[in-house]
Amino acid sequence: MTTRMITRTMITRAVKRGGSALAAAALAAGVLAVGAAPSNAVSSACAAEAAKMPAPWHSTANYDWASPANRYTKASMYVPPYPKAQAAADQAQASGNTAEAKRLRAIAAQPRAVWFTDGSMSSSALTTAVADVVSAARSKGEVATLVMYAIPLRDCGGYSEGGAKSASAYRSWIKAFRAGLVKGGVASGPGVSVIVEPDALALLGNLPENRRTERMDLIRTAVRNLAWTPKTSAYIDAGTHGWVSTSTMISRLSKSGLGMARGFSLDVANFNAEKGEESYGNQMIGRLGWKHYVVDTSRNGNGANGESCNPSGRALGHKPVADPKGKTGSIDAYVWVKPPGESDGSCAKGDPAAGEFFPSYANELAVNAGWYVA
C-alpha cells in the first residue's frame, strides 16, 4: 500500500442506480485524500497484482509530435450538473441557513472536471458517457474538462486500486473514450481538455520494474489518441511538488508522450498553494521550453496542513480561470479537477463515505475562503 491515501467513487454506481449516462459521468468525479509523498519502493500488493496480469506490453508505434491549443481560452469552462450540492443547498435553505445555502449553490455553479474511472466499463457504455458530457458542454458553447483514470495497476494496491485489468483492456478503453469525444461532436464545439491519469507517473516507482515502461507506453498511447482528435488538448498528470524531482518527472513525461500533449497537470485533488506548484511547474517548463500546465485549485486556498482526509482549516482556492498569468505565462488555467465538498472518506471520525457530498465540509471550505461571510 502506498503512503498516499486515495479514494474514488466509480461511474458504475450511478449507472446501477438508473441514472442517465450524463448523470453517471457527472457523479463520477474523483475523490482524493492526499498525504505524504509516495514511496519509490515497489508495493508488495502491486507486485502481487501485476503477477496475475499478462506479460508487459510495449508500444512499437512511432513518436508523433503535436502542439494543441489552450482550449480554455476558446470559451468558458463547462459547469456539469451537481445535484447533490443543489439538494444540500435546498435543505440548508429550508432549515433557515441562508448563507450556507448560498455557499453551496455557489460551489455547484463553478466549472469542474468530470471523471471517468471504471476500467471494466463496456466500450459502448463508456463511449456514450463521454459523448453525453461532450455534447452537453458543446451545446452550451463551453469547454469541458475530462479526466481519464483507468490505467492498469492504478494506485498499486492502495485505496484507489483498480483500473483496467490489462494493457489490452486499457487500449480498448482508450479507443472507446476517444470514440465518445468524436460522437459527442467535439470537432464542432470549442473543444475539451483531458487530464490524463492522475498519479500514474508520480507512483511509477511503486510498480514492479517490468511494468514501468508498459505504463508510460500506455499513457503515450492515450495521449496519441487524444492528439489525433480535433480540438482536444491533453495534460499528463505530474503529481505535485515535493514528490518527484523535476529531472525524474521530465524524463517520465517525455517517455509518456509529452511531445503530443499540451502539457501537464499539477496538484490534482491536493491542498498545496499555487506558489510551490508554480515553482515546480516553471522549473520543468524552463527545461522543456514550449509546454504548458494547469493547476487544480479546488481546495488549496489555505495551503496544505499535512493531513490527508477531509483536513480541517482548508479553503476553496482560486475559482477556475483561463490564462491566470496572462499571455506570457506558462499556466493555461486554474481548474477545479477535484469537486470540492465531496468527502475523502470516513477518515476514522464518522465522516460520509468517499464520494458522498459532505455539506458541512463544503460549507467550511467556502467559509474559510470568505464566501458570503458577514
Image (tube, rainbow, N blue to C red):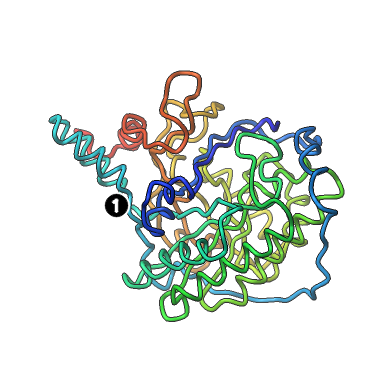
Q: Which residue is most to the top?
A: 349
Question: Which amino acid is tagged 1?
Answer: Ala
In the figure, 88 relative to 253: above or below?
above
Q: What residue is at 71 percent from the left and 64 percent from the top? A: 220
How far across and down, in percent of the image, does residue 151 sit?
Answer: 66, 52
How far across and down, in percent of the image, does residue 134 sit?
Answer: 43, 68
The one of 133 and 290 positioned closer to us in this rendering = 133
How far across and down, in percent of the image, does residue 255 sit?
Answer: 78, 61
Q: What residue is at 57 percent from the left and 57 percent from the top? A: 148
In the figure, 153 relative to 236: above or below?
above
The one of 352 and 202 positioned closer to us in this rendering = 352
The one of 344 and 13 positioned closer to us in this rendering = 13
- Tag 1, which secondary structure? loop
Mark 1 is surrounded, within 10 Å at the Cα level, by few (under 14), some (14 to 19) or many (20 or more) other residues, namely some
Quadrant (top left, top right, bottom left, bottom right) of the N terminus? top right
Quadrant (top left, top right, bottom left, bottom right) of the C terminus? top left
**Residue 363 image-quadrant placement:** top left
How far across and down, in percent of the image, does residue 137 sit?
Answer: 37, 67
Q: Which residue is mark 1?
A: 109
Q: What residue is at 54 percent from the left and 29 percent from the top? A: 308
In the figure, 100 relative to 163: above or below?
above
Count all numbered tags in the image, as a single digit.
1
